[in-house]
């Protein structure tokens, strides 16, 4: 190849590499850019909404924030398909049910998001009678 | 616009894709979209790298059928892409990076058409061998690699921005 062709090829690859360099972590981690795995938060209160959907389900509940203010928390869950396999349906989490959520807080300032959470009734028992209690891990996006 | 995207989201196919717990809903459609992406960009990369001289013993005329492979795989991705957009239309229609992705794909496809015309001539013209591809043809090939890489990056960022 002539020198000029090498120049174009290397220039093109360098530009592509730069584009990828701008987003180093996202290729391997779905939750790390959004949630802080080194911290834990807890929220307890009535469910306001349960969105059973792909690629991520969301649960909303009304609970106190760290300043004692009532806010709506958003809990990110897995996709509808894996939730279905564990026996959940869109009716599993009914509005009004008191639920306890312990998980990783959202990194965004002033937001009230939780991911990778353990969901139980206030006494620590499973949501679904006879169900398991374990940390919900959202599938990679 | 808001009415239209809300209507799209409420259609049967969009609701099923978004809310079904079936492995045949969202997971399958997204997988087909990824396979189509692999073939479109994979076949394009073979063409581009050959034009850039990385496979000097590959006769260029034998690569002509790849254009048909690219168009059919793109058709699969346009179809699955429309369904994936419908399932989340009210959100995706507000994502700037989504429009960036569409623009990059349009540019990449346009560029592919230019490569076909510049290097492979018309449908009945025998293309030159890779060693005689003009610098203009090679430039198009390099641009193609960059555009597809950028389009994939924009698509991936839709989940994060």
Image (tube, helix red, strand yellow):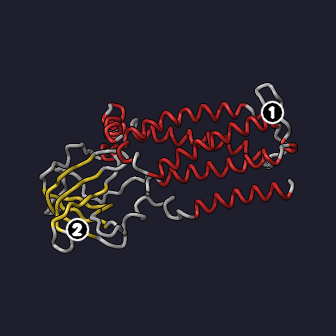
- Going by the image, does A15 lie left or right of A84? right
Residue drawn at point x = 80 percent, y = 25 percent: B124
Residue drawn at point x = 63 percent, y = 49 percent: B147
Q: Is residue A57 visible?
A: yes
Q: Residue A79 or B66: which is nearer the viewer?
A: B66
Q: Name the residue under label 2.
A: A42
Q: Name the residue under label 1.
A: B61
Q: Is mark 2 on a helix, strand or loop?
A: strand
Residue lying farthest top? B124
- Callout 2 crowding tier (Cα within 10 Å): few <14, some 14–19, many ≥20: some
Whether labels 1 and 2 belong to a single chain: the reply is: no
Q: Residue A3 or A59: which is nearer the viewer?
A: A3
Residue drawn at point x = 73 percent, y = 46 percent: B140
Residue B67 place in picture, x, y as percent: 68, 33
Placement of the C terminus of chain B among the 4 image quadrants? bottom left
Residue B79 place in picture, x, y as percent: 49, 33
- Label 1 and label 2: CA atoms lie apart by 64 Å
Placement of the N terminus of chain B among the 4 image quadrants? top left
- Callout 1 crowding tier (Cα within 10 Å): few <14, some 14–19, many ≥20: some
Subunit of label 2: A
Residue B4 place in picture, x, y as percent: 34, 36
Q: What element carries label 1?
A: helix
């Amino acid at each position: 190849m002539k020198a000029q062709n090498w120049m174009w090829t290397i220039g093109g690859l360098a530009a592509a590499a730069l584009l990828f360099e701008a987003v180093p972590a996202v290729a391997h981690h779905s939750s790390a850019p959004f949630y802080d795995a080194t911290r834990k938060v807890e929220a307890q209160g009535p469910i306001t909404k349960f969105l059973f959907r792909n690629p991520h389900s969301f649960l909303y509940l009304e609970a106190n924030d760290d300043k004692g203010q009532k806010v709506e928390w958003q809990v990110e869950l897995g996709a509808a398909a894996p939730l279905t396999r564990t026996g959940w349906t869109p009716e599993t989490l009914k509005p009004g049910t008191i639920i306890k959520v312990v998980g990783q807080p959202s990194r965004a300032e002033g937001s009230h998001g939780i991911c990778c959470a353990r969901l139980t009734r206030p006494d620590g028992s499973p949501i679904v009678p006879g169900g398991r209690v374990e940390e919900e891990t959202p599938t990679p996006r | 616009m808001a009415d239209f995207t809300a209507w799209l989201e409420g259609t049967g196919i969009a609701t099923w894709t978004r809310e079904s717990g079936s492995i045949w809903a969202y997971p399958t459609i997204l997988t087909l979209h990824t396979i189509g992406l692999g073939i479109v960009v994979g076949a394009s990369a073979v063409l581009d790298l050959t034009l850039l001289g990385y496979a000097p013993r590959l006769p260029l005329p034998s690569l002509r059928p790849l254009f048909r492979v690219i168009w059919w795989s793109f058709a699969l991705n346009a179809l699955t892409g429309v369904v994936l957009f419908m399932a989340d239309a009210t959100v995706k229609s507000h994502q700037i990076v989504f429009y960036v992705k569409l623009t990059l794909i349009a540019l990449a496809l346009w560029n592919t058409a230019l490569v076909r015309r510049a290097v492979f001539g018309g449908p009945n013209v025998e293309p030159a061998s890779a060693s005689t591809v003009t610098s203009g043809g090679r430039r198009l090939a390099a641009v193609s690699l960059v555009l597809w890489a950028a389009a994939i990056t924009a698509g991936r960022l839709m989940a994060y921005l």
